[in-house]
Amino acid sequence: MMTEDVLPADTADGTGHGPPVPPGRTDDRARRAGRADLIAAACGVLLVTAAVLVGHAVQSRDGSLRAQWPPLLASWDPHAGPGTLAALITAAGVVAYGPRLAARLPWRGLPAAAWAASTAWVFSLASIDGWHRGVEKRLTTKHEYLRVIDRFEDIPATLHDFTNHIVIGEPGNWPAHVAGHPPGATLTFVWLDRVGLGGGAWAAVFCVVVGSSAAAAALVTVRALAGERLARRAAPFLVLAPAAVWAGVSADGYFTAVAAWSVALFALAATRRVGRPAVAALGGGLLFGWTCYLSYGLGLMAAVLLAVSLLARTARPVPVFLLGALVVPVAFTLAGFNWWTAYHLLVERYYQGAGGIRPYGYWVWANLACAVLAAGLAAVAGLRRSLVAAPGAVRDLR
C-alpha cells in the first residue's frame, strides 16, 4: 500500500513498494514511470479508436448496434452554447491552479472545494445546450423517472405491483429507465416531489449536486487507504473527470455518488481514521444497501469494498457494515418488491428490445472503450500503476 512518505518514483520498482532508490536514480525512475503512463494512455486511445471504427463499420452494414455513434449512444454534433465560456473558464482554472490549491488547502477544505469545482464543471457542460434543453428537460423525457411520479401515489401498493410492469407487453409497462432500475431510483424523485421539489429543474439540480460529491468521496477514500499526498495529487483529475458528461444531467451521477460514499465510509471505518468507526461502517452499509436498490449492476461494488478491506488488512467493520446493508433490502422486501424477480424480468425486457439485436461480440470489449471515455486517460495510467504495484501490495498484506 502506498504511503504519504514515499512517492512511487522513489522506490525500487517505481510503484511505492520496495526499498527506496538512491537519490541519483530517482529522476530516471520517474521518467520511466512517465513513459509507461504515456504508453498505457496510448493503448486506451487505440482501444477507443478501434471501438469507433469497428462500430461504425458494423452499424453501417446492418444497423445492429442500435447506436449512431458507437460505442456511445450519441450523435456527432459539435456546438457552442450558453455554458461554453463557463466550461472553458472552469477547465482552465482547474488545470492552472488546481494542483497548487490541492497541495496547499487545509485537508478539511479540500473535499468541499473539489465538490464545488466538480459541480461547476458538470453544470457548465450541461448548460452548453441551454438551461431548458441541457438541464431542466433531461429527466422529463418519455424514458425517464419523472414521467411516472403520479403512479406512486400509494407507494406500498406500487412497490408490491412493480414487477408486473417491467416486461414489454404488460399493461402499463414502465418507461425504459424505470423498468431498468430497482424502484429506489424512481422513489428518490417521488420523495423530492413530496417535499415540494418536483419537476425537471429540481431533479436535475439534485442529481448534479449530489453526483458531484463523488469527487469528494473519492478523495476521502484515497486518503484513508493511500495517504494524503496521493489524494491531493488526484484532486484535479477527479474534478475534471470525463464522467461529468454522464452526471450532467442523468441519475447516473447520483447513483455514483451514493456508491462512492458507501466505499468512503467503509474505508474510514476500516482504517479507523474517524472518531466512531462503527457509525461510519453502519452508514456505509446503509448506503450500499440503497445503492443496490438504485441500480442492479452496482451490487458489483461489493468487489471494491472487498479490496478496501484487504488494503486496510481488517474485517473488523464488516459485521456492522452488513447489518446496515440489510436494512434497505429488508424494507423493500417487506413492502412486496422482489429484487431477484425484477432483475430476471429486466433481462427478459432487455432482449425484447435492442438487446436481442445488438451483437455481443462487439459490446463485450467496446464497453471497455466506453469505460475509458468515462474515466479518462489519467485513470488508464493510474490503472497501469495499480497493476504494477499489485504484487508488492499482495506481499505487504501477508
Image: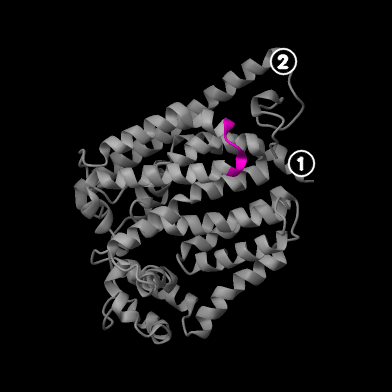
Q: Which residue is drawn at 42% across and 39% down?
A: 240
Q: Which residue is drawn at 24% across and 63% down?
A: 141
Image side of residue 27 versus residue 71, left or right: right
| Amino acid type for the residue under numbered disc 1 | Asp
Asked if residue 93 can be seen in this view, the reply is: yes
Q: Which of marks 1 and 2 is nearer the N terminus?
A: 2
Sort mark 2 into few (<14), some (14-19) or many (20+) by Cα contacts within 10 Å. few
Q: Position of residue 358 (x, y in %)?
A: 30, 57
Image side of residue 390 versus residue 38, left or right: right
Q: Residue at x 55, y 75 (%)?
A: 329
Depth check: give the residue in front, 108 or 331: 108
Q: Is label 1 or label 2 in front?
A: 2
Which residue is under mark 2? 23
Q: Position of residue 183 (x, y in %)?
A: 42, 73
Q: Which residue is drawn at 66% across and 28% down?
A: 7
From what the image shows, is residue 382 above or below residue 349? above
Residue 136 drawn in magenta: no
Depth check: give the residue in front, 52 or 327: 327
Task: Tally the numbered discs.
Answer: 2
Which residue is under mark 1? 396
Image side of residue 11 versus residue 290, left or right: right
